[in-house]
Amino acid sequence: MTNISIIQDDITTLKVDAIVNAANSSLRGGGGVDGAIHRAAGSELDLACQKLGGCPTGQAKTTPGFNLPAKYVIHTVGPIWHAGHQHEAELLAACYQNSLREAQQHHCQSIAFPAISTGIYGYPLTPATKIALQTVQKFAGDIHVIFVCFDEKTFTVYQQLLPEL
Ligand code: AR6
């Protein structure tokens, strides 16, 4: 069975093999968790991201963690919520699946995910959480997955939905 933990914390403080960044398709930083990760990793992260040449929605690309305690940052681009009319569910699932694939390719044993798309990108929290939990259970294999909730509400929803799946 997949090893899943749910915690309330700041993802930039975690000493894990990889943390996932909820980035935008430019990969050049932004607000929310993306801004926090870039600030904590230092300017070398932006230089590394620049070389990646962007990332399409649903895909994932990896850089070192630089000044972060995490070894790697896996940058994925969540869908912007458009009332569910633009394949948001498939694209969000692809973010989790492709991030896990990157983690496996980099021999990671632990990976921490933020609640992708549920902040600035406006994806409703409950359906997004179901997709996160279901997709990870399907594809995580032996990797320890940590869902990192920044706020109390997100933490509560993850805890409520985990036993249902
Ligand atoms: N640690 C863990 N989770 C965090 C942290 C943190 N330090 N900071 C925020 N969160 P968001 P999105 C939570 O908006 O919706 C950026 O500008 C936050 O509370 O960061 O995918 C990008 O460049 C929420 O639960 O990402 C894109 O343009 C979750 O992380 C856009 O925002 C995701 O919120 C992406 O929007």
Image (cartoon, helix red, strand yellow):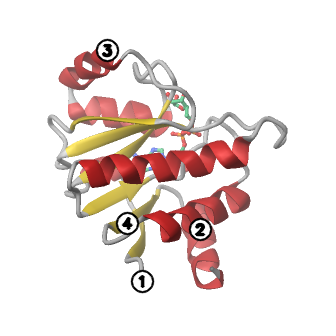
Please tell me which residue is depicted at 60% across the width and 43% down the height of the picture.
117
Label 4 C-beta lies within 8 Å of the nearest ligand 1 atom: no
Say which residue label 1 marks.
1
Label 3 C-beta lies within 8 Å of the nearest ligand 1 atom: no
Task: For marks 1 and 4, give the CA distance.
Answer: 12 Å
From the viewer's perspective, tell me whether residue 79 is left or right of residue 28.
right
Three-letter code, disc 3? Gln
**The label number, if any, that marks residue 134 in the structure image:** 2
Q: Are marks 2 and 3 in contact (CB under 8 Å)?
A: no
Q: Kindly state the secondary structure of the residue where label 4 is placed.
A: strand
Q: Are marks 4 and 2 in contact (CB under 8 Å)?
A: no
Position of the N terminus by quadrant: bottom left
Three-letter code, disc 1? Met
Q: Which quarter of the picture shows residue 127?
A: bottom right
Say which residue label 3 marks.
50
Q: Which quarter of the picture shows residue 2?
A: bottom left
Task: For marks 3 and 4, give the CA distance.
Answer: 28 Å
Please tell me which residue is depicted at 57% across the width and 38% down the height of the picture.
78
Q: Earlier in the sequence, mark 1 or mark 2?
A: 1
Say which residue label 4 marks.
145
Task: For marks 3 and 1, give the CA distance.
Answer: 38 Å
Give percent across and percent down for residue 21: 41, 40
Circle 2 Cα neighbour tier, 10 Å, few/some/many (<14 / 14–19 / ≥20): some
Q: Nearer the viewer, residue 162 or 159?
A: 162
Q: Nearer the viewer, mark 2 or mark 3?
A: 2
